[in-house]
Every structure is written in structure tokens, then in C-alpha cells.
Amino acid sequence: TTEADRATVIANRLEEAVTGLGTDEEAIYAALTGHSDAELREIERRFKLLTGEELDTRLRDELNDSEYARVQQLLNPSPNPDRIAMLLRDAVEGLGTDEREILAVLSGRSPAELTQVRNAYQRLYSESLTDRLKDELSGIDLSAALALLQTGVLEPEDEIKLAVQGAGTDEERLFAVLEELRADPNPRAAIQNVMNAYTTKGYGNMIEDILGDLSGDESDRAKTLLVPEWIDTDDCTAAQRSTLLTSVTGAITLANDAISKIDTDTGAGLLSANVRTALDNNFNPGAMAGAVDLSLARKVRVVLDHTRTDLFTKSDLKCTTSSGPCAPVPTCANYTYAWTYSLSGSTVRACPAFFSCLPAPEQPWGMLHEFVHHTGIDDKAYHTEATFSNLKPLGDDSANDSLDNADSYATFARDV
């Protein structure tokens, strides 16, 4: 049997693996494993003779990014910088730039190998690969490509943004990152750090971007990964757990968005109309002269930041029967939806009324209100009560001090 015969057999196996209803990834990996560079080039040549297609092009169409990256390692066991440079050239030439191809080709390579690729591209095409990528790409595609060109790996926030951008979500990429974060020794802190980095890089609200692209079981799976397993399932029904997951992620989103807007105003040195109005309505309804300024916004930010940290890292949540503060009432006109203590790490107990009386759009606000208490903030008045109009940012813990009123923070975050 000649080398050409063996290459033809393998090319046939590859053609079978990519034909039909589903792609047989394991058959592809097996067919490409253990060959020399010369043998692999002959397999590529035979595949094109057999099918009329380039093997690399067909595999790019059939495989997702991680599968394709693995195949690239098999096809190039001793990477040839010139060959990689040529693949990148193909991706940036022609009618449209192939962003996925660029990212897949650069992924998983060592910094030393990437230096060789940059040098090879410069030598072959008399232009800088970095400059060409800047001409061809923009936004997250550009930042991801430039990061990969230096290190061969992306930060989790970049992977998530790539997964959720555009018309469809790359669920495999997204859940791979979330599973990796969940496996961190301190998953709550890891997720919070990535969310902060996501916002800092100008990508937006990570939780909103993720959940906005998912539905049904995929949405519930994402919520479970984003909120590590501190929701007690022993005393919650499946429906209650789903509601609480949605409420917690919604509360985190409210706090995160409010913090981001305060940070933007702080950077500009001026309160925006939206932030000023929300501060006026929730912290200064009693009309204390000169009270609403950047200093007040910063004080509010500190509490919301501590609340967000508590949501992610310390507290737990349980469903509670109709007893104590959760005592049932004949109607939903007057009820306690949840309760907790003013101590970081305390358990938030969701009453039956949380699920039956508090409207779904208000549940994230209600959850945020409870977690604000964990920063030591008390209850002075709810925004639905007449006494709320007397509140001012006094800072003295008195009956009219809005800075010691949990509802002022939660409602500010909702309004802003």
C-alpha cells in the first residue's frame, strides 16, 4: 500500500465523517491523529481530489470554534509559521473578512509561535499582520484578535462578549466559560470579577447580555451558573427556585447598572439628568437644599457596591413557610414578601407572598431591597408610604434619614 493509497483511505473517512445529518467529530480526530506533516498534506490533497473542496474549508463549516482549533493542532503537529500566515491571509482577503477563522487560527498558540507567525506574515506579504487586522476588524472581534495575536488566549469577559454578540448566541463557547468560572475555587468572586471587567471594557451589562440571548432551559442553566448554589432547594419548589434565580440575577443587574451610571457621572464630574432625578426622588423627596450632588451619588454607590458583593459572595436565600414575619394575609393588599437581618452574610427568607403577591417585574427590586439590609441599612419608609416624602440625606440614622433607608437604594437603582 502506497502513501497515496493510505491518504485516499483517510480522505474517504473524513468525507464520511462530514457527510450526512451530523458531523462525526471523533472520527475526524481519529483520522487526523499520528501523521507526519507530509502525510497530512497528502491527505488534504486527496480530500480535494475526492470532494472538490479544501479540507480546511469543509472542517471550518462543520465544526465549532473549539473543535476546529483542535483539528488545527492535529493538521499542524509541527506548526509551520508560513502556513498559519497563509491561513490568516486567506481569512482577510476576498469579499468579506472571516472573523471566526482568524480567531480560531490564532487560538491556543504559544507567544513564541505567534511571534513567528507575525514575522512570517510580514515577510510573505510585506505588511504588518497587526495593522491588517486593525483595517479588517472592529469592536470585540478586533480586541479579541489582537489579544490572541499576543498570547493565544482570551480573558473570560472577551469570550463571553464574543459568544453573545450578533444575531445568535454561541452557546458552547458561553457555557464553556461559565462552567470554567463555576469550577474556580471561589466561583462567586470569579464571576463578579469577570462581570466588572466586562463593564470596564465597555461591553455593557454581562448578565443582561447573556440572559437576553437565552430562553427556557438554557436561560435557567445560565442563571444557575451565574449564581452559585446558595439557593436552598430543600424548601423551595422548582418554580420558586427559578423565580429566585431570576430575581437575584435581576437584582445584580440593577445594582451593576446603577453603579455604572454613577461611575460615568463621576468620571465626567457632573450628574446626568437621569441620575440627578433618581437621587432627588429617592434620597431627597424632603427637598433638602443642595443635597443632591456627586458626593451623594458616591455615598449611594458605596452601599450598592457592598450590596452587589453580598449578592455574589456571602449571603444565602431560602423559601419560608407562612410563619413569623411571613404570616399570611387575606389579600395581597398588605404583606411581607421577604425578610432578613442587617448583617452581611445573613439569610434572606422569601415568603409565600414573594411569589404570589409581588409582581414579577418588582421581584428583582424586592430582592435588592433585602440585600441592601446586609450593609447595615435600616427600613425608614417604603416609596409607597406617605412618610417617604419626608426623607432627606441627613446621614444621622434618624427617622427621616434616606441614607439609612433600604428602599431608597433599591428604588433608585430601579429608577435610574
Image: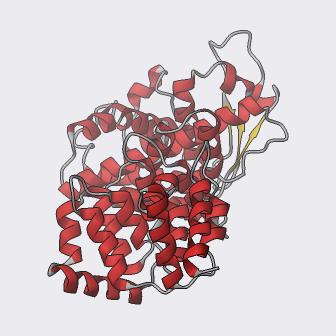
Which residue does the image show at 67% across and 70% down from the upper left? 185
Q: Which of these two is toward me, 265 or 342?
A: 265
| Most distant residue in the left direction | 126
Residue 238 lies in quadrant? top right
The image quarter in which residue 2 lies: bottom right
Q: In the depicted view, which residue is nearer to us: 413 or 253?
A: 253
Q: Residue furthest right?
A: 234
Work out which quarter of the rendered image holds the N terminus and state it: bottom right
- In this image, 341 relative to 279: left or right? right
Is residue 45 in sight in this rendering?
yes
The residue lying furthest to the top in this view is 330
Q: Position of residue 130 (x, y in %)?
A: 23, 75
Estimate the x, y position of residue 120 in percent, counting from the top left. 27, 85
In-image side of 103 versus 8 (left or right): left
Q: Position of residue 300 (x, y in %)?
A: 39, 49
On the question of residue 146 being in view, the answer is: no
Residue occupying the far front of the picture:
1
x then y, percent, for residue 22: 62, 46
Residue under the point 41% across and 55% down: 162
260 horizontally vs 159: left or right: left
Q: How is the image coloured?
A: secondary structure
Residue 133's image quarter? bottom left
Vertically, is 184 above or below 138? below
Which image quarter is the C terminus in? top left
Report the front residue among 231 and 179: 179
